[in-house]
Structures are given as structure tokens and as C-alpha cells.
């Protein structure tokens, strides 16, 4: 199979995805309209990709461009490190989700009947991954050009480029391996050991999905760490030239010819190793993950069901949470806000006095609550994405308004699972009760937002909808709507002097509870009246 | 129990159903036959209330199932394409359905026990659905339609992928539902199954009912020496097409 043919297969798969997203919900869908939708989808995805590339370039290029001649090498060293780690993380995140889509949507299974070799399948998987990470591929040449021009050192261009693509290759390999591991371990449902193994892999996935936030923190300490190593073991610093990703940032700096040759050889060696790892990962993925079924576990008995659930909405939520624990790729956004704590921890831990501690704790807590509310609008979409093709189960047992309500309960329960304990901890530290009121208020707002989002989604899907996708425009609109609905939490923070934030929060908590309660009642009534 | 009157359903420019009417009384098994794209699946989805008809009306147990989705509490459904939650075990899925149907836990555990025994799935309760064979998934879909003892069963190609034993069990279950006064609407391409189970059939062709009534009466009207397959081909205007196709097949291959 030629790459052109693999590319054509990917275009068919994309068309299939667009069809799956609109099938059933759009009664006027015909071939002409489908072609228009495919074209529109391509334009939207191009715009989204361009925005993504621009955002990444804005993070790494300005520090290099703005650096003076003296500080340039140091800045380039730092940003090149960030550039490589960011490329790795981004590709890892996108790659993990893409390999999941290939497995879950059964795209490859359709191709099994064709006389294709393992090599062909690998090529198709690779083409699919390249298609998904396409915008990222444009970053290395742009950044390499910026670095070479700034340092006025031409070898920096190929070396930055080579390391950039090596990081991308490593990201793809790691995401593919993680997909295989998750897929294999998803079959483990019996026994504590199995559950712990699965929890470990799932936890690893969730942490890595948000590692860009953690990365920024780690990056802030990277210089200090290097300085410590330099001080304690000056000789060890020489080794960093050979250890990825440090080798990447060392390689681009101007140096004498023998050192340049060594750096080039190291870069090529890493590229070759990462390519080999990716090749192995793709072989393993294509051989096993896409074909394999989990070993059936025979036996078992119909024990008494533990919780008795009086409402089908709760059954949907429980099922969603169970699937989320077993397959975190279906709903990792749910725990995203927790990672905001990582950014505030240094500020909280290094607070010079009780006043500052109070302020930083309030900021950390309110950020967590508000962020949780904002993402609550996107979680139902992620949960519903997993329902694609299975909506007949929900719709044949429950009404649309029940499904909408059910789909909003899992995000709310997840929200409460972190908002209440963190609220309790903050309450204990501050010696005040109002953080708990905000946890309750936040839970109501999160519920209202996710219910509104579910209502919109359920109204635009049908039993035939195969794939539920959220466009960038819709997600932005939902986020804007969520921001408005999160006013009970954001209100007390607006136009407030940071040093008196805890006083304002304490005095406004009653109002926050009242307005969020009213909001919730209004959205519940809307669900009752509007959803048919 | 089920009444469909002059139902029209359009998808863009395509008219999937053009004034279809049918009814099913308690204790009746109704066969919905027809070639591919004749509108069978659309008709069943309208009966389930998954979509609103563009014309005419659908009544199940006296109610419009689209406006009154609560009526689905008394209905069981097996779709043509069975997709289930792969990351749940068989037991978890059945309990989920019991909860969704607001059943008493003791009742759904007992029903799950009986049905998994009947369909020989009692040793697969801890299996992830993703690890099941196609036949097992089909059995599970049938169990899911029966767990709440529905009054109306809507089955779209229910025996697809079933082995002879499971197919036989399925037939017995249809007789059981019929015996207790339930109505069964069954869409199938397996004419033998329709002949064995159905009290009356509706033959759809290009979104219209081209024949309806008892199988015996339809065959009698078209000539008693004909089989149901021949009647089917004649009424759906496929007999001449088939002759041509066989001719091409013999000449070209």
C-alpha cells in the first residue's frame, strides 16, 4: 500500500465519522449534504488546527524573539526544552485519544476483510495518527527557523527540527503503548489486584493528560534543579548533553565542530531509537489491540445489587461513572479542574503569613470551583460520545428528559467528590464554614450547566446517532454560557481587593447559595418543559 | 395494542414510508417482511417512538409513544444493529437495565437469573460485553428486551447471529409472550421464521404495504402451490429481477 492509498482510507474514515455524527439527527441528510458537511468539517478543523499551532508558537517563540544577544543562549536552552516536552505531551494526548477512536469505533475492523498486510494496517494507523496531529507537525520547522535566526547559527535549524520530530515520534509511540496497555487491562474486572492494576494505568493516563499544567510547574523548577546539580556534581552536567530531553536544548547552542558532530550523532541516535520504538508500538497495536478481544471470564453469580436506585437517572450516572473509572479516556475532563490545585500549591505552601495563606487558599479553592463549573458543560458531551450507536439502550428505557438529567448527574457527582472534601479542608484551615457553602453552590451551578448542556445535546441526537462530536464553536459558546451561569461563584471575586477576598466570600455566600439554587430550579423546569 | 394509521416518514427527499397502516392485537405475532430499504426498520422505530412521523399516527397501548415515552416501560426492543456497553460485564448491564426500568432489585435479579439460564449465559455473567461473541451479544440484546416482561415486543431481525438452539429458545419465548397476551412485532428476512411464528404478516415494498393478512390467506390468494418465498418475490416485484439476475449469473460466471 502506498501512502496515498492510506491517506484515501483516512479520508473515508473521516467521512464516516461526519456521517456518524449527523446520521439520525438530521432527517435531510443526503449524499450532497454529507459532502458539504465533510467540506465544512475540514474547514473548521483547519481553522482549529491553525489556532492550536498559533497558540503553541505564541508560547515558545516570543521569549526567543525578544531575548537580547547576551541572554539568547540561556533563553533558547529553556524554551527548546519546553518545546520538546510540549511537543511530546501534545502528541501523547492527541495520540491517546486517536488510538482509542480507532479501537472503539471499529474503524479498522471494516478493513479486515480486505487483503491488507500487517504493514498496510500499520501504515493506515500511522496515517490516521499523522492526520490527527497534523498541526503539530508544522511547529518544528517554524521554531527551528526562529532559533537558527536568533542565534545566527545554521546547524541549530536541522538539530531543532530533528529533535522536534523525535519528540513527536516518542509521543506517538508512548500513546500507542499506553492504548495497548489500557485496552489489555480494561478486561480486568475481577479481584482487587486486577482492579489496582487497572487503576494504576488509568491514573497514569489521567495524570499524563493534564501534564501540560504540571509541566509548567516542573519547568519553573527545572533551572533550579539544574543549578543544584551543577553545584553538587559539576561533572554530571556534562552528561546532560547526552540525555534526552536535556540533550535537545544543549544541542542547538553554538559550539565547536567536534562537539557539534557529537550532538548531531546523539540527535540522530535518538531519532532512530524513537522511530524503532514507534514501529514496535504500531506493530503491537495493529496485531493485538485492534483485533483482540478480552479473554472471557467464565463464572460469576447474580449477587444482590448493592445500591438500590429509585431513579433511572441515577442508574445512568452510576453506569457513566463505572465506565469512566474503567475507561478514563471517555471522561477525563471530569477531573481536569483538580489539576488547577497544582498551580496554586507553591503559592499556598510558601505563603509568608496567615493573611497571605488565607488569600491564596481562597484563590485556589474558588479557581477549582469555577473551573469545575466551566468544564461541566463539556463533560456530558464526552460521556455521550461513548454512547454513540448505543443510544437505543437509553432511549428504549427512558425519556429524553430523563437521559438529559442522567447525563448531567455523573459530572455533578464527580464535582461534588472533589469540591466537598477540598471545601472541608479549606474550612478547617480557615476556621470558617463558608467554603462549604460555596462547595454546595458550585455543585448546583455545575449541575445546572451540565444539565443545560445535556439538554441541548439530547435534543439534537437520535437513536441512530453514531458519533457525537462537539465543534470548537459550540464548545466556545458553551464555555461562554457556563461563564455567565457561574456568576454566583464569580460575582464575589469581581472588583474585589485580593487581600480582603475571604471577607467578601464570607459575606456573599448566602447570595451565592440563593442564586445558584434559583438557577438550578430554572434549568430543571426548562428540562421538564422544553425537552421532548 | 399497537395501531399505526397512514404513517408517512421522510428523510430529506427520500420517502421511507408512504401511508403505512397496521395493527397488532393482544396475543398476536405480526411479521413485517420486505426487501432491503422497504421501510421495515423505520416503521419499528416509529412504533418505539424514537422519531415523530411526518404524517399519520402511531398508538401503542392507546398512547403516542413519541409524546408519551413512558409507554416504553411496557415495550421491549431489539435493534437491527446491536451495540452494547463493551466495558460493562453482562451482570452489570442487566442490573443497569433493571434500574433504568425502575424494577424491584429482587425482581430483576430473578428475571436475569431465569433469562441467562434459558439463553445459556449463566456462566458469562462476569464477562465483559466486549469479550462476547456476536451470538452472545444478540442473546444479551434479546434478554435486555425481555427483562421487564414487556407487553409489546418490537424485534428487528432478532435471530441474526443466533445458533439453532438459541433460535429455538427464542421461538419458545415468543410463544410465551403471546400466550400471556403480549403483542409481538417482528421484522425479518428469514421467511421460515415468519411462517413458523407469525399470525399475520405485512409485506412492505418501497414504503407501502403491498400485502397483509394471514400467511395462508395471502398464499391462497396468489395461488396455493406457491411458497412464501415465491409470494414474497412476486409481490415485491423481485421475481422478474431474480430471473434476470440468475440468467446473468449463469452466463457471466
Image (tube, grey):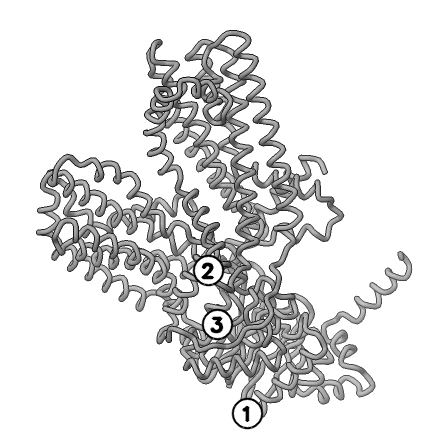
Characterize the local packing of mark 2: few (<14), some (14-19) or many (20 or more) Cα atoms within 10 angstroms.
many
Label 3 belongs to which residue?
Answer: A396
Q: CA distance from mark 2 to mark 3?
A: 20 Å
At a point 46% along the width and 28% down the height, the residue shown is A84
Label 2 belongs to which residue?
Answer: A323
At a point 69% along the width and 82% down the height, the residue shown is B168
Percent x, y for residue A467?
A: 51, 54
Q: Earlier in the sequence, mark 2 or mark 3?
A: 2
Percent x, y for residue A513?
A: 16, 58
- Tag 1 subunit: B
Characterize the local packing of mark 1: few (<14), some (14-19) or many (20 or more) Cα atoms within 10 angstroms.
few
Secondary structure under the numbered disc 2 in the rendered image: helix
Q: In the rendered structure, are the residues bearing label 3 and label 1 in contact, judged by CB atoms less than 8 Å apart?
A: no
Q: Residue furthest top?
A: A256
In this view, the residue in front, A407 or A249, is: A249
Characterize the local packing of mark 3: few (<14), some (14-19) or many (20 or more) Cα atoms within 10 angstroms.
many
In this view, the residue in front, A476 or A325, is: A325
The answer to whether residue B240 is left or right of residue B65 is right
In this view, the residue in front, A489 or A67, is: A67
Label 1 belongs to which residue?
Answer: B180
Query: Which is in the foreground here, disc 2 or disc 3?
Result: 2
Percent x, y for residue B23?
A: 56, 84
- Tag 3 subunit: A
Secondary structure under the numbered disc 1 in the rendered image: loop
Percent x, y for residue A83?
A: 43, 27
Amino acid at each position: 500500500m502506498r501512502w496515498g492509498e492510506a491517506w484515501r482510507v483516512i479520508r473515508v474514515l473521516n467521512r464516516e465519522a461526519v456521517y456518524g455524527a449527523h446520521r439520525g439527527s438530521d432527517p435531510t441528510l443526503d449524499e450532497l449534504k454529507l459532502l458539504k458537511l465533510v467540506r465544512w468539517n475540514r474547514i473548521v478543523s483547519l481553522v482549529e488546527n491553525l489556532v492550536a499551532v498559533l497558540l503553541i508558537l505564541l508560547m515558545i517563540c516570543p521569549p526567543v524573539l525578544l531575548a537580547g544577544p547576551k541572554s539568547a543562549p540561556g533563553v533558547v536552552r529553556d524554551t527548546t526544552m519546553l518545546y520538546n516536552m510540549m511537543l511530546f505531551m501534545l502528541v501523547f494526548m492527541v495520540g491517546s485519544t486517536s488510538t482509542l477512536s480507532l479501537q472503539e469505533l471499529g474503524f479498522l475492523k471494516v478493513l479486515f476483510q480486505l487483503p491488507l498486510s500487517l504493514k498496510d494496517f500499520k501504515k493506515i494507523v500511522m496515517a490516521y495518527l499523522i492526520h490527527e496531529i497534523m498541526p503539530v507537525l508544522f511547529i518544528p520547522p517554524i521554531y527551528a527557523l526562529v532559533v537558527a535566526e536568533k542565534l545566527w547559527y545554521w546547524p541549530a535549524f536541522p538539530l531543532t527540527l530533528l529533535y522536534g520530530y523525535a519528540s513527536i515520534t516518542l509521543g506517538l509511540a508512548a500513546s500507542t503503548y499506553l492504548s495497548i496497555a489500557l485496552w489489555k487491562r480494561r478486561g480486568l474486572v475481577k479481584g482487587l489486584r486486577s482492579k489496582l492494576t487497572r487503576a494504576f494505568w488509568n491514573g497514569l493516563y489521567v495524570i499524563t493528560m493534564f501534564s501540560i499544567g504540571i509541566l509548567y510547574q516542573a519547568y519553573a523548577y527545572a533551572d533550579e534543579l539544574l543549578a543544584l546539580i551543577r553545584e553538587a556534581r559539576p561533572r554530571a552536567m556534562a552528561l546532560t548533553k547526552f540525555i534526552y530531553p536535556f540533550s535537545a536544548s544543549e544541542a542547538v547552542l553554538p559550539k565547536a565542530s567536534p562537539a557539534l558532530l557529537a550532538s548531531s550523532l546523539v540527535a540522530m541516535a535518538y531519532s532512530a531509537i524513537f522511530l524503532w520504538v514507534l514501529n514496535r508500538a504500531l506493530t503491537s497495536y495493529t496485531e493485538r489491540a485492534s483485533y483482540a478481544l478480552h479473554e472471557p471470564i467464565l463464572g460469576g453469580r447474580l449477587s444482590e445489587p448493592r445500591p438500590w436506585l429509585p431513579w433511572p437517572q441515577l442508574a445512568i450516572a452510576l453506569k457513566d461513572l463505572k465506565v469512566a473509572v474503567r475507561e478514563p479516556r471517555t471522561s477525563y475532563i471530569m477531573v481536569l479542574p483538580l489539576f488547577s490545585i497544582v498551580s496554586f500549591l507553591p503559592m499556598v505552601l510558601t505563603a509568608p503569613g496567615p493573611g497571605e495563606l488565607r488569600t491564596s487558599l481562597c484563590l485556589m479553592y474558588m479557581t477549582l470551583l469555577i473551573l469545575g463549573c466551566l468544564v461541566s458543560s463539556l463533560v456530558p458531551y464526552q460521556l455521550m460520545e461513548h454512547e454513540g450507536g448505543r443510544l437505543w439502550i437509553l432511549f428504549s428505557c427512558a425519556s429524553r428528559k430523563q437521559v438529559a438529567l442522567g447525563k448531567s448527574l455523573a459530572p455533578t457527582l464527580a464535582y461534588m467528590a472533589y469540591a466537598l472534601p477540598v471545601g472541608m479542608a479549606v474550612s478547617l484551615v480557615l476556621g470558617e464554614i463558608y467554603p462549604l457553602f460555596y462547595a454546595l453552590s458550585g455543585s448546583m451551578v455545575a449541575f445546572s450547566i451540565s444539565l443545560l448542556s445535556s439538554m441541548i445535546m439530547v435534543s439534537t441526537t437520535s437513536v441512530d446517532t453514531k458519533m457525537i462530536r462537539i465543534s470548537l464553536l459550540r464548545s466556545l459558546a458553551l464555555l461562554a454560557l457556563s461563564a455567565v451561569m457561574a456568576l454566583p461563584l464569580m460575582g464575589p471575586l469581581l472588583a474585589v481587593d485580593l487581600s480582603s477576598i475571604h471577607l467578601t466570600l464570607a459575606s456573599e455566600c448566602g447570595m451565592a447559595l440563593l442564586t445558584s439554587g434559583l438557577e438550578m430550579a430554572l434549568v430543571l423546569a426548562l428540562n421538564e418543559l422544553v425537552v421532548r | 395494542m399497537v395501531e399505526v394509521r397512514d404513517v408517512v416518514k421522510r428523510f430529506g427527499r427520500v420517502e421511507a414510508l408512504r401511508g403505512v397502516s397496521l395493527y397488532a392485537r393482544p396475543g398476536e405475532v405480526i411479521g413485517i417482511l420486505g426487501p432491503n430499504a422497504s421501510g421495515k426498520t423505520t416503521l419499528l422505530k416509529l412504533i418505539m417512538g424514537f422519531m415523530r412521523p411526518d404524517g399519520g399516527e402511531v398508538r401503542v397501548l392507546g398512547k403516542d409513544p413519541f409524546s408519551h415515552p413512558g409507554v416504553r416501560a411496557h415495550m421491549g426492543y431489539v435493534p437491527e444493529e446491536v451495540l452494547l456497553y463493551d466495558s460493562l460485564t453482562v451482570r452489570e448491564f442487566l442490573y443497569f437495565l433493571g434500574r433504568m426500568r425502575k424494577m424491584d432489585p429482587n425482581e430483576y435479579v430473578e428475571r436475569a437469573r431465569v433469562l441467562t439460564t434459558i439463553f445459556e449465559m449463566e456462566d458469562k455473567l462476569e464477562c465483559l460485553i466486549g469479550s462476547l461473541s456476536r451470538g452472545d451479544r444478540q442473546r444479551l440484546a434479546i434478554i435486555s428486551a425481555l427483562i421487564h416482561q414487556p407487553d409489546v415486543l418490537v424485534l428487528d431481525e432478532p435471530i441474526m447471529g443466533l445458533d439453532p438452539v438459541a433460535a429455538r429458545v427464542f421461538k419458545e419465548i415468543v410463544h410465551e409472550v403471546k400466550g400471556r397476551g403480549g403483542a409481538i412485532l417482528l421484522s425479518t428476512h428469514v421467511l421460515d421464521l415468519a411462517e413458523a411464528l407469525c399470525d399475520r404478516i405485512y409485506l412492505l415494498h418501497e414504503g407501502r404495504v403491498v400485502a397483509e393478512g394471514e400467511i395462508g390467506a395471502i398464499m391462497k390468494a396468489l395461488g396455493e402451490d406457491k411458497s412464501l418465498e415465491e409470494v414474497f418475490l412476486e409481490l415485491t416485484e423481485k421475481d422478474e429481477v431474480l430471473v434476470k439476475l440468475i440468467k446473468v449469473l449463469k452466463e457471466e460466471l
